[in-house]
Image (cartoon, coloured by chain):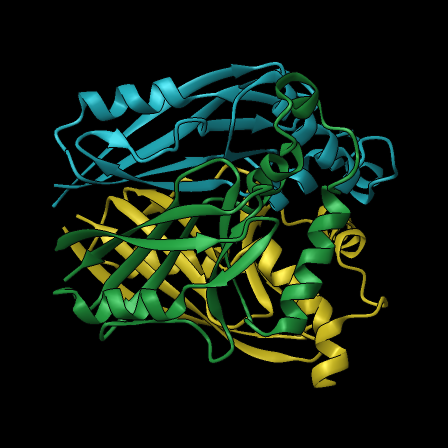
Chain colours: A green, B yellow, C cyan
């Protein structure tokens, strides 16, 4: 077994920007010396998250609305009262969705469903440059 | 270290069917040549998810109700307006719960708590045949 | 590649206690013989979860309030009606947040963001002694 690490760089608009990074994930696997195993994705930072979804405008919009129901942007947050940076809602959203994602790999391909894409969600209240750490483990 | 891949097949009724797959997970570990490491589970498809819960009718029912509060079945979804397949709520639920789960393994047993089972949640609006990819990594 | 397993012990007050375990995670990595790879964390038990958040009182309080919106403590739970242990809300919360977390490791350090801490959430309705299983995989 081997392990390989690399990074995916993504520029976001913030404000619950949902970015499809599936082609970057597929590219990393094609470039890899590992054919079978798992790809682990992790976004550093406390206002972003990773998940999978059918990446089409409707479903993405629906997801944003559900997240808004759980942690509305315009209610009062203690984080904002203390630190004044206005992104209390971003921290809550990120903690609930989660920063890590693991996908099995067979023949250098991620075992995603046909309509299942890998997305980065940037909840911060401003544009950000994000790094997703990619680790491919296997043989 | 070694890695082994296999599949668990599950037939669901859809409609937020919650299926206990713990015995299948335990069986895969007993059949494995790996004794210590991790078992990675991943469900392909954008309308299903994996998590752990105490698998008894009450807690499962309570979980379904909480999911219904977050992404109610009968509100308007953009996904449905565009594609007409009526499972917009399924996509949102799946993206929020997450498709992957990793459990440590010691002596060919998953380190689940006594009352902690591994479950597949099928949020689609019709019965489905699901595949859970199983990867056991370790030595 | 190698794999190493160990445990982090945490005493909680329960009642959605959020405990920062980042220093324990860093300590495990410093003690390890593995420099590059991943650290997998898993909490056994069906009323606790793991995630990352900026660990400061405001953001933690905001997260607790969001969790209370999703699975309020004082509504009726079927689990409680059947089993009478009063922690139905705890099971729902734990299933939604998730029991596992995977973080990449480079040079014996977890690739967390500057303001991103690793936390255990104990949702049970009483103090608990928790075990977090730690697995470090890599080389």
Quadrant of the rendered structure where residue C60 is?
top right
Q: Is residue C50 above or below residue B57?
A: above
Image side of residue C57 versus residue B10, left or right: right
Asked which quadrant contains residue C132, the reply is top left
- Residue depicted at x 21% and y 55%: A137
Above-or-below relation of B19 to B104: below
Q: Looking at the image, is A55 positioned above or below residue C92?
A: below
Image quadrant assignment for residue A73: top right
A49 left or right, relative to A112: right
Decide if residue C1 is on the left or right side of residue A108: left
- How many numbered badges does the structure rendering display? 0
Image spot of residue A88 (x, y percent): 65, 32
The answer to whether one can see residue B44 in this image is yes
Q: What's the residue at 72%, 36% (across, down)? A: C66
| Residue C25 location (% of width, % of height) | 34, 24
Q: Is B61 positioned to the left or the right of B109 in the image? A: right
Residue occupying the point 23% across, 56% down:
A136
Q: Pinpoint residue C33: horizontal percent, then vertical percent.
A: 12, 29
Front-most of B59 and A36?
A36
Q: Is residue B15 visible?
A: no
Residue C64, given in percent of the width and then of the height, sits at: 69, 28
Q: Nearer the viewer, residue A96 or B63?
A: A96
């Amino acid at each position: 077994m081997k392990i390989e690490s690399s990074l995916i760089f993504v520029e976001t608009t913030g404000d619950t920007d949902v970015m499809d990074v599936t082609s970057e994930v597929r590219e990393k696997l094609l470039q890899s010396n590992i054919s079978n195993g798992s790809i682990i994705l992790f976004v550093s930072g406390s206002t972003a998250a990773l998940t999978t979804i059918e990446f089409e405008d409707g479903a993405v919009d629906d997801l944003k609305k559900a997240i808004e129901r759980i942690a509305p942007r315009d209610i009062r947050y203690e984080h904002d009262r203390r630190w004044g940076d206005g992104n209390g809602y971003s921290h809550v959203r990120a903690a609930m969705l989660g920063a890590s994602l693991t996908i099995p790999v067979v023949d250098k391909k991620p075992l995603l469903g046909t309509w299942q894409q890998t997305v980065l969600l940037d909840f911060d209240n401003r544009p950000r440059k994000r790094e997703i750490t990619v680790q491919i483990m296997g043989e």
